[in-house]
Image (cartoon, grey):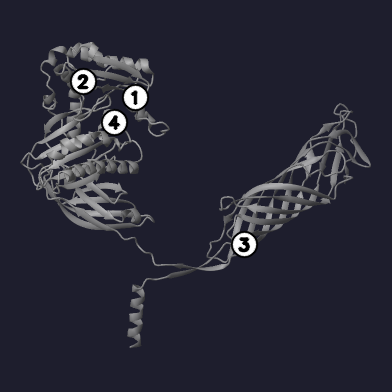
Amino acid sequence: MKKILFIIMIALGFQMPALAQETQYEKPTWLFGVAAGANFNFYRGTTQRINADLMVPTAFHDGTGVGLFAAPLIEYRFPNSVWGIMLQAGYDNRQGEWDQVISPCDCPMDLSTDLSYITIEPSLRIAPFKNAFYLFTGPRLAFNLDKSFTYQKGTNPEYPEQIADPEVNADFSEVEDRLISMQVGAGFDIPLSSNKQRTQFVFSPFVAFHPYFGQNPRSVESWNITTIRAGAAIKFGMGRKRVIEEAEVVKPEFGFTVDSPQNVPGKSIISESFPLSNYIYFEKGSTEIPGRYKLLNKDEVKDFKEDQVAVKSPKDLSGRSKREMAVYYHVLNILGDRMGKNPNSTITLVGSSEKGPEDAKVMAGSVKTYLVDVFAINSSRIAVEGRTKPKVPSEKIGGKLELDLLREEDRRVTVESTSPELLMEFQSGPNAAMKAVQLKGIQEAPASSYVTFKTDGAKEAFSTWRLELTDDNGTVKNYGPYTEEEVSIPGKTILGNNTKGDFKVKMIGTAKDGEIMTKESNINVVLWTPSEVEEGIRFSIIYEFDDAKAIAMYEKYLTEIVAPKIPKNGKVVIQGHTDVIGDAENNQKLSMARANDVKRILEAALSRSNRKDVTFEVYGFGEDTVKSPFGNNLPEERSYNRTVVIDLLAGNKTL
């Protein structure tokens, strides 16, 4: 029975959270040891009267030497502080040799000394960065030990038979018994023991500077010494015992879910009101209309129709971005066609250039020349202005980030008009947007059809996480790394050329301490295609850079044009976007603010009509380049990405 109880206790012990205990020691506050090093001595001044019995014929001035420094030491460090005190007391040699001088008889003279002291050096210690590096400074009190010298006068080289005077070995006279000077230095502590040992050793190389003031060895003449000391200390001390309890490691909790919509294959067309930007962007250094804009010759004008622009676009275009940018690049032809059909309409072309108003006016003149020469618009209907900055600039005062991209957007010609037939419904004034282009085209997969992977708690649990998808053939695709908690991937990206497939999904998270954590799931992915009935109506609104309040100018448009077209029991999907300029987190908030503003206006319009049959889906995609309607390389693409896309759907359909 005792054996059984013992085995049970062991088993329970393994299952219980263990609190591992390990004895460790704090860093010592008191340290003892020895320091040793070399004194690099530099002599300056005048030395001629050596003692009462000897005055050399020519004064000595400069000299150098290397002497020994050795001393026991004591050090105290205040706990949890950068401050401490140090004390060294020992042997300090300031020996050296003067540079040879020549006497009046052309005889060389040499002088050296073995000057040495007992030194006492208390110092204040500070570790400014709370690490192993430290500084120290304090006074130096020196008591003379040795004041001997050796003097030798040689013979004139021109008289080789001359006999040299005997070498003189004696003591300097009038040597100060004690000196008070100072030092300043730095060192670095290198631990030689772990904190698991009570007795801890430290190796500490150091360097110190002893300036000349206070270091005049004699009370006569002007001989002084400057010293640079380099050495190292070995120190040891006893650390105070402490017990570290390693608590049970609590792994962060996180959830992982996958939503793969059951998309139904089909085919459809969507009707869209595509906003027409009234900006024409120019290349830096050029005043000619850029080649990416579609320009016609006179013979092609009679066959140009605004509602056929999308139909006449190149057949190899795919995707909303390519198809609708092709429409935008016809902006000058659409403008010319509209002015031709409305002979009373007028416009003002406002150029803006970093080179100044004259250069900007030439840019605007290029657009005017095209409209006059190709579309035969009377020149009196087109005014031209030039500015250094546009009236609504992308580059804001005080801005510091990505200025090259913002200035690229400010080099443009803005089409202004007060003619209602050229403007978006319910808008007026020179700043009003141009009338949208009506398009019909194949609908692309919306965000609601993407496969969504959600890792709840990812921001707290992981530094990053990624996805590993394996199909039935064993082919592995990797996605990520991600830092947000939710990501959506288009079915087309996962399936490639297939219309459906089964996948094993592994979420691989890297915790902030480096540990790898995984969770697995299975999904079935079906490629989205539109339903068979034409059901979708799309509107878009574009904004100026970093602006979420411009929606006010569209309020009547949303209220009186968009809201009445929402089907009975319908659904409204609102998607906010931004360009890639600026901080990603701020762009996420900005896109959501734009989308919610549209929702607010539409809800208010429906409420006034006593309609409560409409549901809303609101998304803020920020600068997400996977979901962005357009690219971000050109200023016009970034401009169109500052948008809210509004899809009006039948209630039982998924766009």
Q: Nearer the viewer, residue 499 or 263?
A: 263
Mark 3 or 2: in front is 2
* Alpha carbon distance from label 4 to label 1: 21 Å
Compared with residue 230, is residue 547 higher up or lower down, i.e. above or below? above
Which amino acid lies under the numbered mark 2 shown in the image of this protein? Answer: Leu
Mark 4 or 3: in front is 4
Mark 3 sits on what residue?
Answer: 29
Mark 1 sits on what residue?
Answer: 390
* Alpha carbon distance from label 2 to label 1: 19 Å
Mark 4 sits on what residue?
Answer: 633
Residue that appears at 12% across and 44% down: 498
Q: Earlier in the sequence, mark 4 or mark 3?
A: 3
Q: Nearer the viewer, residue 635 or 496?
A: 635
Q: Residue 82 at x, y = what percent?
A: 60, 54
- Secondary element at tag 2: helix
In this view, which residue lies farthest toward the left? 532
Q: Earlier in the sequence, mark 4 or mark 1?
A: 1
- Secondary element at tag 1: loop
